[in-house]
Amino acid sequence: MITLDELLARYDSATAVRLERWIFRGIVRPDQVDPPRFADIDVARVELLVELGDVLACDDETLESVMDLLDQVHGLRRRLTIVAQAIGRQPEAVQEAIAAELHRLDEETREGD
């Protein structure tokens, strides 16, 4: 984990005011609040926020929406991994039935497009 000063030193345009706004909005969530300390995931989020804010000129509202969507995608990926693990623990016949049903549903979806 790194401190607020260490995080700010990594990115020229990540000012204390800007970072405090992101924390207030819940876009960045330090692991420790007093004093603020940031885990690797927070550092990665700040890097992405700086790039989106500077390169694409996104405002805080847009940044919040983008990060929310990314969080949803990561949550869905985690859930999908759990579902795949649960399926993998089932008997082979059940796994085959699930695979066949997934294939059938995929075909139905393609036909509807």
Image: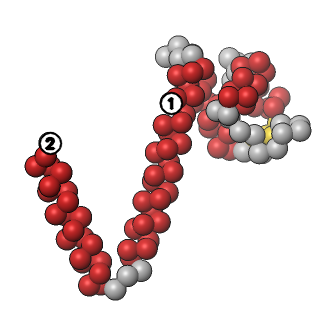
Q: Residue at x 45, y 62 (%)?
A: 81
Quadrant of the drawing holding the N terminus: top right
Q: Nearer the viewer, mark 1 or mark 2?
A: 2
Q: How is the image coloured?
A: secondary structure
Whether residue 51 appears in this view of the structure is no
Residue 66 tag number: 1
Q: Residue at x 50, y 39 (%)?
A: 70
Residue 113 tag number: 2
Whether residue 101 appears in this view of the structure is yes
Left or right relative to 21: residue 61: left
Residue 1 or 74: which is nearer the viewer?
74
Residue 74 image point, x, y percent: 50, 48
Residue 111 tag number: none
Residue 99 image point, x, y percent: 24, 70
Residue 54, placed above or below residue 90: above
- Quadrant of the rendered image containing residue 2: top right
Query: Which residue of the protein is positioned furthest toward the top in this rendering?
Result: 57
Disc 1 vs disc 2: Cβ atoms closer than 8 Å?
A: no
Residue 11 image point, x, y percent: 69, 24
Which numbered disc flags the more N-terminal residue, 1 or 2? 1
